[in-house]
Image: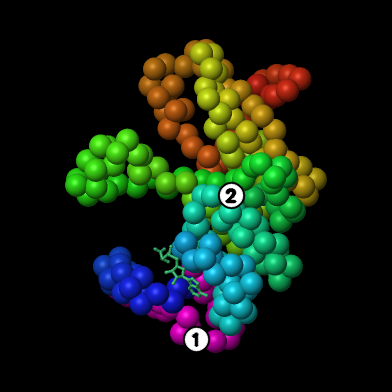
Amino acid sequence: MDTSELMLKQARALMAGLCPDREVYLGNKVPKGEAKNTLLLFTHSLNEMGAEKAQQYIELVKPSVILLMEPGTKDAFAKTLELRQWCVSKGFNVSYPCFSNSPCPLNLEEDWCHQYLKTRHAQDVESMTQKLGRDRKLLPMTIHLYTIEELSKNQAQEHTARLVRVYKQTKHSFEWMLCKEVEGQNITFNVEVPKRGMSKKEIKAFEEIMAGEKIHYSVVKEMEQKIRIKLI
Ligand SMILES: C[S@@+](CC[C@H](N)C(=O)[O-])C[C@H]1O[C@@H](n2cnc3c(N)ncnc32)[C@H](O)[C@@H]1O
């Protein structure tokens, strides 16, 4: 969903290369009505149009799935949460990143939830970003998936959580904030994963784990401020 002719031209070229056989509508000239099995996609456009305009598009298309891929900023997250609340009120389920449709538990005055997209660029762009000391390979994104069908039930297991924040690791442990569903509410809590017993290779693999991933864990010890866990 976008209205910029330049952006639509680029999208057309991408779609022609990636999925020439799919029925894809670009722009706001979409078929109206009960679109069964239709995905409505906003990429960095909800952020500009705002939640109210996005709601109008959703009411027009009546999709069964909505995917948002927006900037990983506090501002974009606020707009996403506004749309999330409206979508839930219209019968959508939050299938990613949350484990339930209940409100976001973060302190929204100072915090927001985002994920990352790992990208690669052409060699000239890579060397330019290196010279500028800017990492453009890891893009913070706000990624949300809403579905009319409830997909998330199998995710809401007792020891399954979403990694929402990766803190600076200590000498002895990885330090994370997780989010999970408890009795229908989303809650966040801090955990540590001890490095003891990990090989260098395992430590490297842990360093690659990013916010947005699903974590299966067992509790090793409940401490005052956090829980010590191990991954299953
Ligand atoms: C940062 S660009 C993102 C472009 C493209 N969607 C992408 O992912 O690369 C923001 C886009 O929001 C679109 N936009 C802003 N207001 C809009 C509206 N009311 N309806 C549809 N698109 C809108 C603009 O046309 C612009 O291309």
- Look at mark 2 in the image and give the residue it sits on: 74
Q: Which amino acid type is marked by label 1?
A: Pro
Q: How far across and down, in percent of the image, does residue 17 sit?
A: 26, 68
Residue 21 in view of the camera: yes
Tag 2 secondary structure: helix
Magenta residue span = 20-41
Mark carried by residue 225? none
Q: How far across and down, in percent of the image, does residue 35 sit?
A: 55, 80
Vertical arrangement, residue 100 with respect to residue 167, above or below: below
Q: Residue placed farthest to the front in the image?
A: 132
- Which of the 4 quarters of the picture holds residue 55? bottom right
Is 185 left, or right, of 37 in this rendering? right
- Which of the 4 quarters of the picture holds residue 222? top right
> Which residue appears at 76% of the width and 20% of the height?
224
Question: Which residue is at the front of the view, 168 or 36?
Answer: 168
- Look at mark 1 in the image and give the residue it sits on: 31
Decide if ligand 1 comes within 8 Å of the CB at mark 1. no
Image quarter where the C terminus lies is top right
Instruction: Sort mark 2 into few (<14), some (14-19) or many (20+) by Cα contacts within 10 Å.
Output: some
Label 2 and label 1: CA atoms lie apart by: 33 Å
Main SS of residues in magenta: loop
> Which residue appears at 25% of the width and 37% of the height?
131
Q: Quadrant of ligand 1?
A: bottom left
Magenta stretch containing residue 49, yes or no? no
> Which residue appears at 56% of the width and 56% of the height?
76
Vertical arrangement, residue 73 with respect to residue 130, above or below: below
Badge count: 2
